[in-house]
Image (cartoon, rainbow, N blue to C red):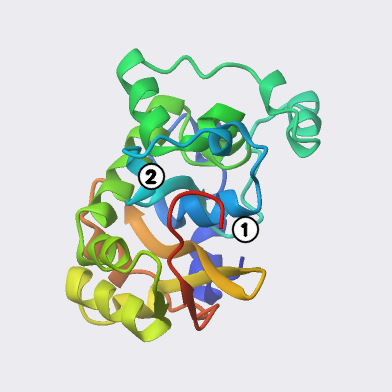
């Protein structure tokens, strides 16, 4: 994923911070958040999609996909060949456990449905190892950022638009209302076709700095990105 020359230069400086024993990342990154009902339309056999309770969090809120240090080549920091190969073959269950605290495990189960498919192990091995030397830090920071979006006008726009179409300008305007002028220019929309519908599946948000900073400052410090999909339907839970 290309986020401009600014992100590339900063990313080269901060690449693979876990190898220098730093516990927290400070640099360009991308927060990837999924609209889970749309994801599940095309992944109905995945454990997180087989049984979806009517009151589950991700029915009406964004779910965590990952937090990716930039540039896109900044991956698999200090990871063994065997782990890298297992990850690339999607044998995520074979990856080592992360030793997360019980409270964080419970939180991830709610906010990152893909943990049922061991997505959290994949995201740590591929991206988290370049963010921190601690899986706990990586996921605490990831959840903090996700929850800022889910407490914003962006989540409210999506939740009240379930079953309806949203345009790119509507989504970007919600980001501007929540996180300041220009925030919409740091958001890329991903969509997929599902029969005669185009579904919004994911948003990727450019950030730059420390996750301990508020979202508005992180977004403002990031370069602009491509807009992606021009808009689509906000899918409702269940297979259509």
On the image, the x and y values in percent for residue 144 come to 28, 43
Look at the picture and state if 2 lies above or below 47: below
Asked if the residue under mark 1 is in contact with the one under mark 2, i.e. CB atoms within 8 Å, the reply is no
On the image, the x and y values in percent for residue 82 come to 80, 24
Q: Residue at x 33, y 28 (%)?
A: 107
What secondary structure is found at the residue carrying circle 2? helix
Residue 16 appearing in the image:
yes
**Image quadrant containing the N terminus:** bottom right
On the image, the x and y values in percent for residue 199 come to 54, 68
Closer to the camera in the image, 9 or 70: 70
**Mark 2 or mark 1, whichever is nearer to me:** 2
- The disc placed on residue 233 is none
Q: Residue at x 60, y 70 (%)?
A: 2
Residue that numbered label 2 is attached to: 58
* Mark earlier in primary sequence (2, 1): 2
Query: Badge 2 local density, few (<14 within 10 Å), some, or many (20+)?
Result: many
* Image quadrant assignment for residue 154: bottom left
* Image quadrant assignment for residue 180: bottom left
Look at the picture and state if 95 lies above or below 29: above
**Image quadrant containing the C terminus:** bottom right
| Marks 2 and 1, how far apart at CA | 27 Å
Residue that numbered label 1 is attached to: 72
Q: Residue at x 46, y 27 (%)?
A: 135
Residue 23 appearing in the image:
no
On the image, the x and y values in percent for residue 149 come to 28, 56
């Amino acid at each position: 994923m290309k986020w401009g020359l600014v992100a590339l230069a900063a990313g080269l400086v901060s690449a693979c911070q876990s190898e220098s024993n730093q516990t927290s990342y400070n640099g360009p990154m991308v927060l990837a958040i999924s609209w889970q009902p749309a994801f599940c339309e095309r992944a109905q056999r995945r454990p997180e999609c087989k049984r979806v309770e009517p009151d589950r969090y991700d029915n009406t809120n964004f779910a965590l996909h990952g937090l990716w240090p930039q540039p896109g080549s900044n991956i698999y920091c200090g990871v063994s060949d065997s782990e890298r190969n297992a990850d690339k073959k999607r044998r995520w269950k074979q990856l080592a456990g992360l030793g997360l605290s019980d409270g964080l495990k419970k939180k991830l189960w709610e906010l990152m449905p893909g943990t049922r498919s061991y997505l959290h192990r994949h995201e740590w091995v591929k991206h988290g190892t370049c963010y921190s030397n601690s899986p706990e830090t990586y996921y605490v920071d990831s959840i903090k950022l996700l929850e800022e979006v889910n407490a914003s006008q962006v989540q409210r726009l999506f939740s009240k638009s379930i079953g309806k179409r949203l345009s790119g300008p509507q989504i970007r305007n919600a980001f501007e209302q929540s996180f300041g002028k220009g925030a919409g220019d740091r958001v890329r929309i991903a969509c997929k076709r599902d029969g005669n519908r185009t579904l919004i599946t994911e948003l990727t948000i450019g950030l730059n700095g420390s996750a301990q900073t508020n979202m508005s400052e992180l977004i403002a410090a990031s370069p602009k990105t491509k807009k992606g999909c021009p808009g689509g339907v906000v899918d409702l839970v269940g297979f259509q």
